[in-house]
Amino acid sequence: MTASVTLPAGLPPAAPGTYEVRGSKKFGWGSPVTYLIALVLIVACVSPVLYIILGGFRTNSQITADPSGFPSPWVFSNYTEVLASPSFWIAMKNSTISALGTTVGVVVLGVMASYVIARYQFKGKGAMYSLFAAGLMFPMTVAITPLYLMVRTLGLTNSLAGIILPQIAFALPTTVIILVPFLRAIPKELEEAASIDGASRLGFFWRMVIPLSLPGVITTGILAFIGAWNGYMLPLFILSDPETFTLPLGVANFASQYSVDTARVLAFTSLSMIPALIFFSLFEKRIVGGLTGAIKG
């Protein structure tokens, strides 16, 4: 007596001596575990941010009585007083100048350096690329002392230029590593066709290379902006005048002045985070798409 087994449509016939049991289900035990781990990480990351934002709507007595409670009643005066403070807007202006200046410098220099490494053949090309790659292994904290001495020698202490230039230098390795695969993936036939049509190398760079590598350019620009906006170590060493403080230093200075007013310090901190959070949220897909393109390239 022989048993016949009906296979689902579209599947190849089973090998002789093997049977396929219909109705069997394959349980993906990895998916629930993955979602659980992701949920735990999300809660761990979001909880401090929510605590700071909600803490700004409380009074000091509420925070002392119940540190993890919700505002009851909601107090908006902490935020209005911070928004009325000149020091907040001075720090906001300095952070904006620092972040935008760093972003422009990183994008311009990074695109040009990446284009040369990706499209040209010359001696020392591999060494140059390896130098940028090695820059990823040296954080700013390692070089902060010689960096401060160099900035002081150039006379750039207590100036935004003294933090913009080092921030550009330390953001260039990441920019080059991301942009080189984008520029290398541009077909050479496209460059040859543009050359036949009379386009110069510089014209091909502006008209074809920049538009085609725009996802990577936007990604590196966003990363440079957020890194400069959140930078604390370098401004701490370079800036000592409150008129030049960026928001991270402004938060620390404000916290030292109002150390007993915890609610107002939390309001100042949350307001300083909002621009970076909004900026990152708006361009989140651009960052993921740019990094994905760099990996594929």
Image (cartoon, rainbow, N blue to C red):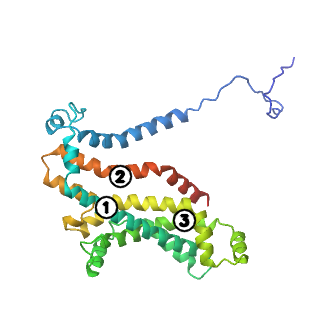
Residue placed under numbered mark 3 in the picture:
179
| Quadrant including the N terminus | top right
**How far apart are the alpha carbons under marks 2 and 1?**
10 Å
Pinpoint residue 63: horizontal percent, then vertical percent: 18, 37
The location of residue 43, given as percent across then percent down, is 38, 38
Q: Which sits in the foreground, 230 or 138?
A: 230
228 on left or right of 87:
right
Q: Is residue 115 something one can see in this rendering? A: yes
Q: Residues under labels 3 and 2: Cα distance?
A: 26 Å
Q: Secondary structure at mark 2?
A: helix
Q: Pick whichever of labels 2 and 1 is earlier in the sequence.
A: 1
The local secondary structure at tag 1 comes to helix
**Residue identifier under label 2:** 275
Q: Looking at the picture, does residue 149 appear above or below residue 103?
A: below
Figure quadrant of the C terminus: bottom right
- Nearer to the camera, 15 or 237: 237
Q: Residue 222 placed where, x, y %?
A: 45, 58
Residue 86 higher or lower than 127, as above or below? above
Q: Nearer the viewer, mark 3 or mark 1?
A: 1
On screen, residue 48 above or below 253? above
Q: CB under 8 Å between callouts 2 and 1?
A: yes
Amino acid beneath label 1: Ser
Residue type highlighted by circle 3? Leu
Q: Quadrant of residue 224?
A: bottom left
What's the residue at 15%, 54% (across, down)? 256
